Image (tube, rainbow, N blue to C red):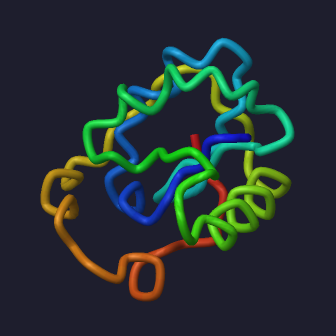
Amino acid sequence: MTYVVIEACIKCKLQDCVEVCPVDCFYEGENMLVIHPDECIDCGVCEPECPVEAIIPDTEPDTEKWVEHNQEYAAKWPNITRMGEIPADADDWRETPNKLKDHFSPEPAKR
C-alpha cells in the first residue's frame, strides 16, 4: 500500500503533509504535490494533515490513475522536505471541480 495525492491538491498545495512525513517522499510541482509511491512507507501520518483531504491510500476505489500520476511526476519534480509558500488564492480553489483537466500544471515548482 501507498498513499497518493489526488486532484483536490491542485491549486491549493497547502503542504501541511510535508512537515510530518518521516521519509520525505513528497515532490513539488508548480501547483500540486505528489507522493513517490516507492518511497512512501505507508505510515499514514500525512493523510489527516491535509485540510482538503487530497491524500488517500491506494486501497481506495479508482486510485490506479492517481498512483500512476504520483509516480510519473515524482520522477520529474524536485523533492520537498519543508513547507514552502502557500498559494495566496488556495482557499478559492478548494471546491473547484475538474481541476486535473482544467488547471493542472506539469511544470516543476520554482523555488
Looking at the image, is 63 positioned above or below residue 3? below
- 40 relative to 26 in the view: left or right: right
Number of disc labels: 0
Residue at 37% x, 76% y: name it. Answer: 99
Residue 89, percent across and down? 19, 55
Residue 4, percent across and down? 60, 49
Residue at 85% x, 54% y: name it. Answer: 75
Residue at 64% x, 31% y: name it. Answer: 80
Q: Nearer the viewer, residue 111 or 54?
A: 54
Residue 86 placement: quadrant: top left
Looking at the image, is 50 positioned above or below residue 20? below
Residue 40 placement: quadrant: top right
Looking at the image, is 104 positioned above or below residue 84? below
Q: Quadrant of the N terminus?
A: top right
- 34 relative to 24 in the view: left or right: left
Q: Quadrant of the C terminus?
A: top right
- 96 relative to 86 in the view: left or right: left
Residue 104, percent across and down? 49, 74
Residue 14 placement: quadrant: top left
Residue 58, percent across and down? 63, 52
Q: Nearer the viewer, residue 56 or 78?
A: 56
- Give the farthest residue toward the bottom: 101
